[in-house]
Image (cartoon, rainbow, N blue to C red):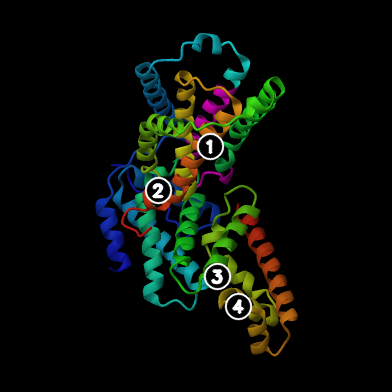
Amino acid sequence: MPSAPEATPARGSAASRHAALDSLMRAAQQGDGRAYHLLLQEVATRMRRLIMARAPWLGQADIEDIVQDVLLSLHLARATWDPARPFMPWISAIARNRLTDHARRYKRKQAFDQAAADLAEVFSTTPGQSHADGVVDLMSVRSAMADLSEGERRAFELVRMKDLSPTEAAHQSNTTAGAIKVAVHRASRKLRLAINKDGEEST
Amino acid sequence: MKTDALIDSLVRDAGPVKPLQPPLRRIWGWLALALGFAGAMVWAIGPRPDLAERLFEARFVLEQGAALLTAIAAALAALALTVPDAPRFWRWVPALPAAAWLGTLGLGCLRDWAQMGPAGLRVTPDPECFVYITLIGSLPLLALVLMLRKGAPMRPSWTLALAALAAAAIGNFALRLFHMQDAALMVLVWQFGAVALITAIAGLCGRSVLRWPGMPA
């Protein structure tokens, strides 16, 4: 039985964290239980962060439901991972697929769809597929959120995360629907730029 | 179940797994089976008497080549779609040979019309095409579905539609080797039409046939 890789994915640069995930998955495919345990825990942590940021209205049980769904899917599909390719794009594709499926089961469908679309957008606008850390590692999204103005952040949260219409969001913010649309557009652009920049810097 | 408990049970369940070969390697076994079965069916039914003559006719060879290429491209695309990080363009790969196939039939219609006038574009019932294409495509489809179920059902409707397109195109390829029907419009309506219908039906059934085990469709 191969030994578990020495590197753990929790520390180091994004590139080394990804390399650690690659070697964990490689070892897991070869039957290394300890590596597989570490890998599943890491994926669960990242998925939990992603869902809590994207769908803050979900209860703990629902969040764990989705996390478990992704873990189970990873488990069932683990033979489809090619050890010659990076792990992150592979697990990101599975996570996006499961999120999209869950979107059908929750009332907040539109917000989930938006989360899936955001994932796809970040995924497709980064050069190559090696920046999937920007997708699942929501730390970059959170730090990018801090750079938004108060109005942009509030508009983005109300429309994109809480699924309010621009008119409803405008009513809550004492402004106009047009101003909300502009703020959401600006916030989306800034976030996309910030996430892509983060991805480029981390490789 | 708590997530930690699930992780423990998944780890207990996980032995070594052999990574799936890339689609370009997996397809050869399927192609051999599909063509072998199609060949056996042609032999059992009896090849058309003018087959040797037809094999030297450019139009027949082009149409058959496009059908076979469509089958290969569709099977490759279906296999690729069950790999989570495969590029999205795979689903469109069969469009090129399928367009070429459709194009050769379309040109054939024009030629038939130019040579025979309205008589060249007559459509008469030929429903057995659908039966033969389904029959010959059944085993290749079953084999391909079994292969696809080893992958991840990322896009089940597309995947099953492409698999059915591959199997039906093989069925049509074989049909032309024993069925004496070369009028382009008849081939277009009854044979290409049957392939398109089978593909569409399969697309609708995708989520029932290919889904994550243990999860609702």
Using the numbered discs, state the Cα–Cα distance from disc 3 to disc 2 in whole angstroms: 33 Å
The x, y position of residue A60, in whole percent, is: 39, 76
Q: Check disc 4 and report its element: helix, strand or loop.
A: helix
Q: Residue beneath label 3, please? A: A110
**Residue at point 39%, 29% (across, down):** B136
The x, y position of residue B34, in whole percent, is: 40, 27
Task: Give the label on residue A157, or none.
Answer: 4
Tag 2 or tag 3, which sits nearer the N-term?
Answer: 2
- Give me the chain letter of mark 3: A
Local crowd at mark 3 within 10 Å, few (<14), some, or many (≥20)?
Answer: some
Q: Residue beneath label 1, please? A: B193
Using the numbered discs, state the Cα–Cα distance from disc 1 to disc 3 in whole angstroms: 37 Å
Tag 3 or tag 4, which sits nearer the N-term?
Answer: 3
Which-is-in-front pick, marks 1 and 2?
1
Residue A5 showing in the rendered view: no
Q: Check disc 3 and report its element: helix, strand or loop.
A: helix
Q: How many labels does the image show?
A: 4
Same-chain check, marks 3 and 2: yes
Going by the numbered disc 2, the residue's amino acid type is Met
